[in-house]
Image (cartoon, helix red, strand yellow):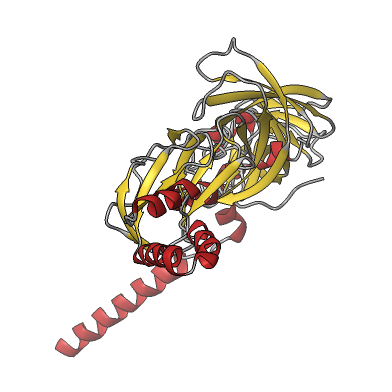
Amino acid sequence: MRNSYIVNISLLLTAVLLASCGQKQPPHKGHDAHQEPAMDKSVAGLTRSVNTHIVATIPAISPESGTRIQAADVNGVITYDTRNQTSIASRIAGRIERLLIKYNYQPVKRGQLIMEIYSPDLAAAQRELLYVATASPQLLTGAKQRLQLLGMQLPQIEQVLRTGNILYRIPVYSTADGYILEKSAAVATVAGTAAAPAASGDGMSSMGGGSAPAAAPAPTAPAATPVMLREGQYISAGQPLFTIYQAESLVAEFAFPPLLAARIRQGQQLLFYPSADNNAMQTGSIGLIEPVFRNGENFTLARVYLSTHTLRPGQLLTASVPVVYTGGWWLPRKAVWKLGNQTIVFRKEKDTYLPAAVDITAEAGDMIQVSTAIGDWKVASNAAYLVDSESFIKMNNPQQ
């Protein structure tokens, strides 16, 4: 009996399993596909990477064309004319016993005492002079010439012969009127100047969308720093000591950024005025154009030589330069974005904006001149709104 129960239960379970399996139907492909949600094409663009594709509703603008005349401002400074200078060197080796020059650009007069030097060689030459004067008068002329070559003045030589006393301190006098500068400081001044705020006008836009033009380093005012020479210091024969810049002629020196420097020429007239008084207008012509690479900055110095003036060394200036811009296309500064060595705009394609590289040829006021053919483009009016600080912008160069 027990065995029959086991058989009946097994048959029952088997029948239940067969019945359940018979109710299952194979899946219908069309039915499942009908239930899957379809991708809405209206939002497909929103899923693309913001590195190459930006959806925005900001206004788009068209580039402008035509010739523009813009006055660009550049900064400058009044400095000394290096063509009119006098150098003072030591003719003998010795020790500085007395130094009357305390700081650079100290005013001096012709014949003014600068320093006194003690020299054993000069003392020995004076003893020889006194000996020759009594023992061999025929050699006296040669002995005087030797002392003159060593830096002694003829009245000093006559004083030694008259008194018989040796002059152990030999004075050194200024040879011109002007402003005296220590020779080492003069070399440093010519070799480089510190950067100063430069013109607003025709500079490259800065990182951050070009909201302001790049500053070109401007010449700095001469600094009245203490001299490095000290009393008791030994100097060698022929050592350059000082440079004297004559005060009659000065130079107005202006720093031009690269884009604007390409538009100036020698002989061009500049209108400039002291930065503190824009009513004191003056004119001058560019006498020298010098490309300069200094402290990591590339710019151009333009010098205006002043014959008659009421300015003083170190005075800061502002020059206004009229520039005619032709060709190309013009965009507002805020529509252009600076990416290191590349400049981009955001070109509108249907409902999206794509970044595109452009070439800049000039900047005038709040407008930027682009040489890339963008005449039929629509670009974002403000590039800063489309820059994602978390992404790197990638471009496919969609230039035409």
Quick one: 31 or 110, which is closer to the camera? 110
Residue at x 46%, y 53% (from the top left corner):
152
351 with respect to 323 (left or right)? left
399 with respect to 193 (left or right)? right
Estimate the x, y position of residue 56 in percent, counting from the top left.
59, 32
25 with respect to 293 (left or right)? left
Compared to 125, does 39 lie above or below? Answer: above
Quick one: 278 or 206, which is closer to the camera? 278
250 with respect to 208 (left or right)? right
Res. 335 image quadrant? top right
Instruction: Please identify the residue farthest to the bottom as the structure is shown.
Output: 3
Estimate the x, y position of residue 270 in percent, counting from the top left.
71, 25
Whether residue 370 is visible: yes
Res. 14 image quadrant? bottom left
Quick one: 298 or 61, which is closer to the camera? 298
Quick one: 131 or 28, which is closer to the camera? 131
Residue at x 43%, y 71% (from the top left corner):
21
